Image: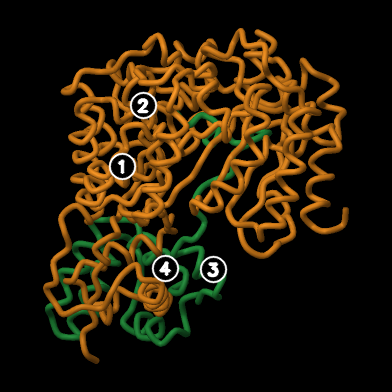
Chain colours: A green, B orange
Amino acid sequence: MPIDDLKAFFAKLETDADLQAKARALQGSAADERVAGLCALAADAGFTVTAEDLKSAAAGSAAAELDDQSLRAVVGGICSSPGAGGGPRPEREFLG
Amino acid sequence: MSPRYAALRPDWLLRGYSDRPGVLANWRTGEARPLAAAGAYVARACDGHTDFTSPIFLPKHQATLDLMLAEGLAEECAYGAELDPRQRFREAPNRYIQYTQWAVTGRCNLRCRHCYMDGPTGRWGELPHDVALGLVDQFVAANVQRVHLTGGEPLLRADFWELAGALTEQRIAIHQISTNGVLLDDEALQRLRDLEADPILHFSLDGVGTHDAMRGCDGAEAAAVDAIRRAADAGFRVSVTSCLDGMTRDGMLPALDLLADLGARSWHITAPQAIGCWATASTGLSLDEQADVCEPILRRWLALGRPMLVTLCGIYSGAPGEYVPPQEPLHRCTPDDLHCGALFDDTAYVLPNGRLIPCPRFIGTPFETALPSLLEVSLSEAWADEGFRARLGVTKAEVLAHNPECAACDEFGECGAGCWATAYAATGHVFGRDPVACDLWKSPYRRRLAGIAAGTL
């Protein structure tokens, strides 16, 4: 399932600093070499990703896109988890 | 396609935690933007060297970058733009901790009758300079994003400005400073500006004509009012807390006009909790009496055009400006919740002796000494230790089992059986019920004041 592999590879790429460093090291090379290098990195990580998959993803037709709400969740805007306690928050009540 | 580079804007830092892939933190304002994995991935690439046209970025990453640019988190740049090293991604081994209230001293220059910190006796003392600086290092290692400096009177500490400088040097936001105002002269305000810090300055003012009696010193009110005026005139955000009891009640309503005139951004009226110096006080007000004070204040606040944020003894809270109907609560309590929502949430409180507690209400409870001292274990280690949560985490279910009236109460979803520490202070029982919250949630006052604010009463 190439699309599943593509998604899984990018999910790993988003969270794996070592893989990110290797991927970024490709950016000085020519476009075709970048794609080939990225496919090789994916293979090393256990995923089957082809140049066609990457081109399709870059065109926005393969990877799941984000709606506005999802996008905002990616970039933040929800600052902290709500407290579970009842009554007034103590932070405001004990100020020197 | 031309290469596309971006860099984080200078005020933004990228931090990571064991339970969060990334958080963008603004070191001047204290604002935090938790990121999902894709957001953290894009933010890490905002380093001035990574080409966003590379196939390692999908259209969703491009859209994420566009949003970060639009919201001022990052800016497009030429290749090679360098981030300040302090902005770069730094991962802490602990769970997310955003905010630390740090009582840098237990000493005070006033003699407040209600001090939870026993300031007049100096019970808590203060840590030596080098040890206090070591705490700053601990905050850095744990990726604390912002600090609220409090006390005692924090400006009484001889090395206060060195500690403040150490925090800003490490790009930890000084988000608030709580002070009685006596030592906050123009030089102090300028030193804050020199540190590029823009804290909320949080003053205590226990009413007009009543402050000195609560604070135990003649001239404290004049000093506080003067400091509030100078701070607001200098452009600092000013917040004020007032303690309500039988001796200060008559000074509360006049304080509203004064604080509106001075430009205070927020005003919090609260009844002291029965800990510290207040444990044996006899001038506390009942909820009925508190409501009698709060209602005229609410009406006057509405007549003045809602000039600041107000919180009135937990009975009412309202934002400045136009009326906005109350929102549904973000979270309704369930039996699985920890009874204390602050316990190892994203906020910590550090006592003057280095003890880590969830909030000052825990002073005098069994948790106070059961929780770790930062002189013995680092903040990062303490925050990463899930065992503390397991050992100290009284759940709502346990409280409900001991208080069947709470289990049957319609208000539980919002009240949550109240505050763990308040319950302990009142009952001496680990699974006790918080009588303050119980009275409040069962009373008609919250609905009544909400109705007045909405114009329906």
**Badge 4 local density, few (<14 within 10 Å), some, or many (20+)?**
some
The residue carrying mark 4 is A5
Q: Is residue B98 visible?
A: no
Q: Would you name the residue on which mark 3 appears? A: A70
> Mark 4 or mark 2: which is in front?
2
Find residue B302 and report its image quarter.
bottom right
Q: Are marks 4 and 1 on the same chain?
A: no
Left or right of B36? Residue B254 is right
For the residues marked 2 and 1, what is the alpha-carbon distance in whole angstroms? 26 Å
Q: Quadrant of residue B227?
A: top left
Front: mark 3 or 4: 3
Give amino acid for label 1.
Answer: Asn
Q: Is residue B360 above or below residue A87?
A: above
Question: How far apart, in angstroms, are the residues tagged by discs 3 and 1?
Answer: 26 Å
What is the CA distance from the residue labelled 3 to the residue labelled 4? 22 Å
- Is A35 positioned to the left or the right of A94 in the image? left
Name the residue carrying label 1: B143
Give the Cα distance between marks 4 and 2: 59 Å
Callout 4 amino acid? Asp
Q: Which residue is mark 2?
A: B153
User: Given the image, what chain letter belongs to the residue carrying mark 3?
Assistant: A
Instruction: Look at the numbered disc 3 and give the secondary structure of its residue.
Output: helix
Percent coordinates x, y for residue B149 in the rendering: 35, 34
